[in-house]
Image (cartoon, rainbow, N blue to C red):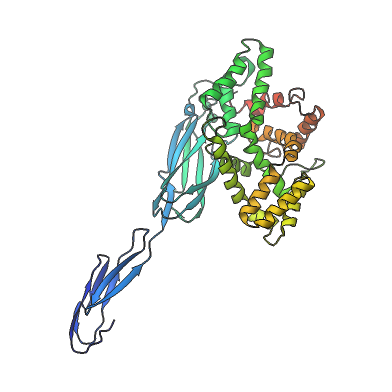
Amino acid sequence: MNTAAGGCGWTAVSNAAWLTVTASASGSGSGTVNFSVAANNTSEPRTGTMTVAGSTFAVDQAGNTNSTVQFASAGVNVNESEKKVQFTISRSGSSALVSFVGYATSDGTADRRRDYTQTLGTLSFGVGETSKTVTVFITDDTFVESPETLTVALSNPTGTTLGAQRALTLTIISDDTSNGPNPVDAATFNSQYFVRQHFVDFLNREPDTAGLNFWTNEIESCGSNQQCRELKRINVSAAFFLSIEFQETGYLVYRMYKTAFGDTTSPNVSGTVPIARLAEFIPDTQQIGQGVQVGIGNWEQQLEANKNAFALEFVLRQRFLSAFPLSMTPTQFVDKLNQNAGGVLSTNERTQLINELTGNNTSVGRASVSRKVAEDADLRQNEKNRAFVLMQFYGYLRRNPDDPQDTDFRGWKFWLDKLNQFNGNFVQAEMVKAFITSTEYRQRFGP
Ligand SMILES: [Ca+2]
Ligand SMILES: [Ca+2]
Ligand SMILES: [Ca+2]
């Protein structure tokens, strides 16, 4: 900066600690003042001043909102008998922005279908939040095993960057000194173990004490009557699919996919098969179920908030936007949802939804309308058996119907036909029984 008055003496002084005059703190006549600016390590913008030749000059500097997200360590050991492991993902630097980061488990020597529960999703750091906790459930089986590993990796950062520690190795330490007995076999059945595993497999959570006791007692009330115990095992098991908590979380996710994307086909199977896949079902169901335990606390408000947040996020995904471009009219939008859902809307319902979207043709409006079609009573009824059979594969076997040991949906279709033949009576169709006594299910837990 040049001082105007020729020949007069002048000084240049910084009035802020982060501004430093680096050359010509004083001079005479025309001259140049250089200064340096220190990095702003806060998220707040700031203004400092310098006084040059009696005049005040302001310097504005933006806040620093950079942050880094990473694990606290490269590895964590977990004893199988602890049944779960929790670890922390930290955000350092600024917490002035909302940041998102994806996380997902992948198999090392540990197998997602037998040694732990596949876990994936998106963490959301709110303003001011610096750490998040993730839980991975470990299967406490009765196999003698060497230590086994899986990896949890961070991905897709938004509003932040990944630090160096972006992968975490979990090492599972088995506690067994001899093989067996199998806790889900009739002769050595452990009802509490069986019930807890259902909370994990269907509701993605540890049981609450009342729930654990209630369902355990259902089975134990049979005493040693084996016929009674077998029937109770089946009914208790099916109760998890039929529970409000599952119907309003996992089953809603299933119906959201059906409503948005219709059905698909499978080789060697007549008709259509569900379009949802386990790897998208897991994070979406966990998201809707976050903090929800039916019957406990303000679960209804929490569930409603989760559903709205999920529906909004769902209609903003690229896959949804490709299927439902923003150029669609409200009528086209509603009709396509209705067609995918199998024509479940009555004339009045259709008109109401078109009117709603016409009055609010935004992402929030699209989310609301999509959710209402997915929650239509006819759709709920129509899809019940198809979803019930799909959940036999997801919940018990922890895989898609066409994952190994299968190659297509023939197994799913077989049980669907059988369940339909018995009008949805899963006891008479012997469906639940077949899954919970199958070798594939049993071998998740023991020999
Ligand atoms: Ca194991
Ligand atoms: Ca064990
Ligand atoms: Ca073991």
Picture coordinates of residue 63, whole percent (x, y): 38, 62
Asked if residue 311 shows in the view, the reply is yes
Question: At 66% from the left edge and 18% from the top edge, which residue is drawn?
Answer: 232
Depth check: give the residue in front, 338 or 32. Answer: 338
Residue 139 figure quarter: top right
Farthest residue in the top direction? 224
In the image: residue 333, left or right of residue 284: right
Depth check: give the residue in front, 172 or 256. Answer: 256
Picture coordinates of residue 48, whole percent (x, y): 29, 68
Asked if residue 340 shows in the view, the reply is no
Question: At 51% from the left edge and 36% from the top edge, which residue is drawn?
Answer: 136
Picture coordinates of residue 428, whole percent (x, y): 77, 22
Picture coordinates of residue 296, whole percent (x, y): 53, 30
Placement of 125 over or under 41, stated as above or below: above
In the image: residue 395, left or right of residue 75: right
Farthest residue in the left direction? 9
Placement of 92 over or under 286, stated as above or below: below
Depth check: give the residue in front, 378 or 388. Answer: 378
Can you say which quadrant of the picture contains the N terminus?
bottom left
